[in-house]
Image (cartoon, grey):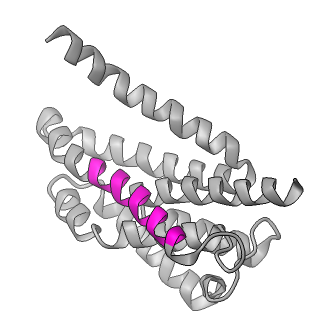
Amino acid sequence: MANMLEIISNILTGFGLSVSAGLNAYIPLLTVALLARFTNLIRLSHPYDTLTNGWVIGALVVLAAIEVVADKIPAVDTVYNILQSVARPAAGAILFAASSKVITDVHPALALICGLLVAGSVHAVKTAARPVITAATGGAGNPVVSSAEDVVSGTVSIVSILMPLLAVVLIMVGLWVILKPLRSTESTS
């Protein structure tokens, strides 16, 4: 029973980290790398333990900084989001596989596909929504929305590691908050 709970916990962590990667590829990667290197909160199996290398962490810091800045600038964010169409789903795949302990619990291909699909879906919605936000706000909403995405990505990353079930609840509540206004406008049309 305890082993089954650990497997479920690892899978929920993988889903949460993949959602985070769909918003920002490097915040969850950096979170996992730092927590794996400096705490016992997450243990990465080979080859994912490469994330704890100092050079990799340094590169993730630089990439996270670039993403945080580029995603705040109207028009630049649209181009950047298109460029991230490979990185975000790949980050989700890596994070899902790394956190689900693919060596023993989940087949590696299944873990990678799950992470790819989850992060890719979140990324697709973000990429489609950003030009609409830019047009609707004249670009003024971009920094606000991007900052919110960064906070959500970081928060869900940490909560996914510490309390995976709570992360899933937060994601579901977030989806409900986002989709409720859309459903209201559909029913009034």
Is-magenta flag for residue 160?
Answer: no
Q: What type of secondary structure mainly makes up the magenta span? A: helix
Quadrant where the C terminus sits is: top left
Is-magenta flag for residue 125?
Answer: yes
In this rendered view, identify the residue nearer to me: 156 or 136.
156
Looking at the rendering, which quadrant does residue 6 occupy?
bottom right
Say how many tags the image has: 0
In this rendered view, identify the residue nearer to me: 88 or 149.
88
Q: In the displayed image of the protein, which residue is found farthest to the top?
A: 188
Q: Which residue corresponds to the image point at 60% horizontal and 82% vertical from the top-left?
A: 51
> Where's residue 7, x and y in %?
74, 60
In this rendered view, identify the residue nearer to me: 54 or 120.
120
> Where's residue 56, x and y in %?
55, 86
> Where's residue 168, x and y in %?
60, 42
Vertical order, 167 against 14 (above or below): above
- 86 to the left or right of 103: left
Vertical order, 65 against 143 (above or below): below
Q: Which residue corresponds to the image point at 18% horizontal and 57% vertical from the top-left?
A: 78
Looking at the rendering, which quadrant does residue 70 occupy?
bottom left
> Where's residue 54, x and y in %?
63, 88
Write the start and end of the magenta stretch as one range.
Answer: 110-126
Vertical order, 90 against 71 (above or below): below
Q: Which residue corresponds to the image point at 64% horizontal and 58% vertical from the top-left?
A: 11
- 152 to the left or right of 52: left
Q: Which residue corresponds to the image point at 14% horizontal and 56% vertical from the top-left?
A: 75
Looking at the rendering, which quadrant does residue 68 occupy?
bottom left
- 166 to the left or right of 77: right
- 156 to the left or right of 163: left
